[in-house]
Image (cartoon, grey):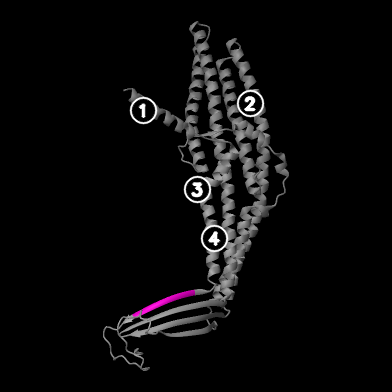
Amino acid sequence: MRQSLIFIISIFMTSFSYAQESVANFSLQEAIDYALENNRQAKNAARDIDAAERQKWETTATGLPQLNGNVDYQNQIKQQFEAVDFNGDGIPDFGAKHSVTATASLTQKVFDGTYLVGLQSAKVFLEISKNAKEKTDLEVRQQVINAYGNVLLAEESIKILERNITVLEKNLDETTKIFENGLEEEESVEQLQITLSGVQSNLNNTNRLKSLAYQMFNLVIGVDINANTVLTDNLESLATYNINLELLNQEENHQNNVDYKIALNNKRSNELLLKLERSRSLPVLNAFLNGSYIANRNAFDFTHSDMPWLGTVTFGASLQIPLFTSGQGKARRQRAQIDLDKSNDDLLETEQQLKLQIKSAKSDYQYAIEDYDVKKQNLDLAERIESKNQTKFFEGIASSFELRQAQTQLYAAQQEFLQSMLDVVNSKAALETILNSPIN
């Protein structure tokens, strides 16, 4: 029995130790760094770059020497002719029952316009993959900031709601006693009950939202949604840290934005497609070197050293000259030119949109900072007003309705202040994303 008890305690302590070790603590920057390595979208974007590197080499390799080998064996089960030995060396030159041909072929592109364009296209495709990775990382960073802030908002909301409930329960208890002594109206008790039930319902909902917010955060950073994670930053310190007025004066260079880079690479890609169609009208020159050995036998005895193989080596070149395609090449070039014209307009449209988006993001960030200061002042005022009305109520000067109004105003001010802090953090992240200049 004692041994069983020790065994159970050991299992419990091991499980408890494992649970303790499985808790992951994250500051905001730690969460961003972790997500950039483990977020599934970020990992796939990195894989796309690796695939583009392989594709670039695949394209390059098509223009390098190609060596192929081939071995053919024939067994004439039913022969039309008897074997003939022209050389009198005992080796049939014609009509042998068994024959083997071993061939090696070396080919090399000498000139092919489409290959040269293909090399340039592979480089552009690699750049496009890198742009996609950059865009994904920026989006993941912003998602982490938003998810981190939502968790902190839920946490802070729960703390405030719990404090409000404690105060309301105390007020309700005192008011109920006063009512029971005949010194207060029943409506005062009912007003407090209405306020308390509303705050309790809000707390229950916020607790549910907190669980969802943690799961969303875990999903974004790339861990199991039910993992035990702890956030070490707090909302107010993050808001204060993210107030950076210098960011509002940063140069509005839309060319740094990844969307502009993507649009520019799309234009370059279409330029190369047009160049590709034009290169199809150029001659293609290839060189080759072929070597082969042939052996004919009446019996399957190709391994005997005294039975020679007949060899031949051929060198040559082939020149392919496009002469007439019934207008197919012209149609391809015209279509490629249309796509290029479209990408030019897309690039201009992207440039104009980014200029507006940068100005809008700066405006949103400036408003968030200003609104944070206003909401902080409003919260101080609402706290003083609620405190005064609470004192007046218990002194019999203010009505329960006036107290409830003051409390409702305070609760709204509390939530608005929390939201204003979150808006500062999120709007700064949005501005840094569009400027492509994240500041840690």
Residue at 70% across / 52% down in the picture? 253
Residue denoted by label 2? 379
Q: Main secondary structure of the magenta part?
A: strand
Residue 218 placed where, x, y %?
Answer: 50, 39
Helix, strand or loop under label 3:
helix
Q: Tag 2: residue type?
A: Leu
User: What number of labels is visible?
Assistant: 4
State left or right for residue 419 relative to residue 249.
left
Helix, strand or loop under label 1:
helix
Q: CA distance from mark 1 to mark 3?
A: 40 Å
Is 333 situated above or below 19?
A: below
Q: Tag 1: residue type?
A: Phe
Q: Tag 4: residue type?
A: Ala
Residue denoted by label 3? 40
Q: Most extreme residue toward the top, as rendered?
A: 181
Residue interval drawn in magenta: 67-73
Residue at 53% across / 57% down in the picture? 50
Residue at 62% across / 53% down in the picture? 258
Q: CA distance from mark 1 to mark 2?
A: 56 Å
Q: Quadrant of residue 249?
A: top right
Residue denoted by label 1? 7
